[in-house]
Structures are given as structure tokens and as C-alpha cells.
Amino acid sequence: MEKKQWKWLAISVGFSTVVLLFVLWLTIDENTIGYLRYAKVEFLAFALLLHMGAFVFWALRMKMMSHSLGYHVPFLHSLNAVFANLLVAAITPSQAGGEPVRIHELYRSEVPLGDATAVVIMERVLDGIVLGIIGIFSFLMLAFQVSDLEVNLTTPLLIMWFLLVVVLAVFVNSIRHPDFLKRLLKRISGWFTKRWKSDRVERLRERIDEEVDNFNAALAKFIGKARPGLVWGMLFTFLYWIAEFLIPSCILIALGKPPHFLESFIVQLMIAILMMIPLTPGGSGIAEIGATSLYGLFVPSSIVGVFVLIWRLIMYYFNVFVGVLASVFIVRREMILRRIKRLKRI
């Protein structure tokens, strides 16, 4: 990585660590040791395996969606692309910053740039659709009072679900009217670019036009000849998010508490949406504070800090670790390819 990227990684990890230490300082008491003494390590190991399984589902999604466009992307190549994506996502605002890495890795696997972009764009679209479906399902479960908690999660869930529905509605409308999406994005960007120079604003507008055209081109490909890719993509997207959302419940069982599957799914949905908002690098701090506040509604205060620490160790720090390893592999590969090109020129 470049020096600037290492700096942002240090800021992201440092901010997350400070927030975690603060949460632990507020929540640890004499009962915490008792909970930890009887912790079930096997469930913690299973939580980590679920997280690794989610990466496998993500890699399979990339592989099968690329295959539907007529390209063979090796599974291990897709998996390494997912790992490298995790590191970039950890140092960019929100957790949705690894798309260029995945596009580059698909391109390295002989997928044309346009089709690689189509695959990555559709991944994000499928994420939004699946999260919306999970939100609807969770709301119905709450409506039928499946939850036995005296905690009102209906209102925040409705707000999050409403935001997803708005985004999906804009998505559907943009399919039929691409110019509508261009005008909308330019109007929104105008609120943040009032003090920009005119040439910089113009470049942004051109970039918006380009990205909207890429988006519609990607959609056209998958609605056309690559429809099986959407089916595979939807399947692996569901498996990915279900695996990720089950991790907190496994941690709760390991700490000797009920899994609270429904409540945990709702909280994870809220956190996933919050972390897509570009506020801090990798969503660090946002995730810790959000998880502590929401899980604190039904998890004893004695262990909520430890719970959040373990959750972030699996969901964030482990991501950084495998991301660094994958990035080192990619950098080494790129250096070898450059040497080969130089030798061919000689």
C-alpha cells in the first residue's frame, strides 16, 4: 500500500481501538469475569468460521456472475479479490470502498473492464435488494410479536426499511429513466460543491454521467444474456448476509446468553445501513457505538462491551489482517508482471 493508505489504516484502526477501550471502560464490572470464565470457545470458533464462510459465498457470487457473462474466473482469484477489497474498505469512508479493487482483480482475470464493472455494480444492487427483503421479513416477525422482548425496535427498523425502499425505488425508476438519476445525483452533489471551482464541478458532473451509464449498461447485460448470473448472485448474497448476521448470535451463546436471533438480525441490518454512510474510515467508531447502543437494549451491561469487542475482532480486525495478506500477494504479483513485461521488451 501507499504511505497515505497506511496512514488512513492507522487512523481507522486507532479510532476503532479508542472507542472499544472506552466502551469496555464503561461496561466492565465484577460480573464480567464470571461470564468470561464460562465462555464457550467452540461457539466463538464457529462465529469465525461463519465469517470465513461469508467470504466464500462472496467469492462464489463473483465467480458465478462473471461466468454468466462468459468468463472463467478461478475461485481462489475471486477469494483473494474479496480479501484485498476488505483492506480498502477499512480505510475508505464507510465500508463500501473496495469496488475498484474487485474490478481490477476481475480485469486481471481477463474479464473486460466494462463487464468487470457490471459484475461489481450488480453486487451492490443485490446487496440492497437482499437487505430490503431481510428488513421486510424482520418487520413482519415483529408485527406478529415473535419477539418476547419489551424493546421497541419497530420504529428504527421502519426508518431503515423506508430508506432502503426509497433507494430501491430510485433504482427502479432510473432503469426506465436514466436522465432522472443523473439529475438527482447532480442536484444532491450540488449541495456539497457550492464552494468548488467550476472546472472541478464539471468533472464531477461528467463522472456522474459516466457512472450512471455504466450502471444501466451493467443492468442491461444481466437482464439480457446473463440472467442466470442474477439468480446465482441473489442466492449467494442471501447466504452471505445470513452468515454475517448469525455471527453476533453465536457470540452471545458463547457468552452464556440467549441468541436473540430476530433482534440481532434487526440490529445488524441497522448497523449495515449506517456503515454505508461515508462518515469514518471503514465505519470505525460508528459500528462500535451503534452496536453498544442497540445491543445494550437486550444484552446485560456487564458483557455488552466484551460482546462488541469480540464482534469487531471478527468483523473488522480479522478483515484488516486477511486484507493485508491479500494486498501483499497482489503487489508481489504486479511486480512480477512488470518484470516480465520489461524482459519481453528487451
Image (cartoon, rainbow, N blue to C red):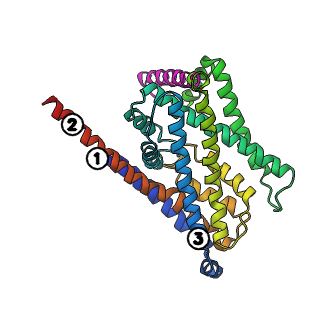
Main secondary structure of the magenta stretch? helix
Please say whether residue 213 is one of the residues in the magenta stretch.
yes
Q: Which residue is mark 3?
A: 42
Residue 15 picture location, percent across and down:
48, 58
Residue type of the residue flagged with mark 1:
Arg
Crowd class of label 3 (few under 14; some 14 to 19; many from 20; radius 10 Å) = few
Give the CA distance from mark 2 to mark 1: 13 Å
Front residue of 295/194: it is 295
In the image, which residues are magenta? 194-220
Above or below for 292 versus 99: below
Crowd class of label 2 (few under 14; some 14 to 19; many from 20; radius 10 Å) = few
Could one spot residue 179 in this view of the protein?
yes
In the shown orientation, is residue 309 left or right of residue 202? right
Q: Which mark is residue 332?
A: 1
Q: Which residue is mark 2?
A: 340
Residue 339 picture location, percent across and down:
20, 39
Q: Residue at x 42, y 51 (%)?
A: 323
Q: Circle 3 sits in a helix, a strand or a loop, which is it?
A: helix
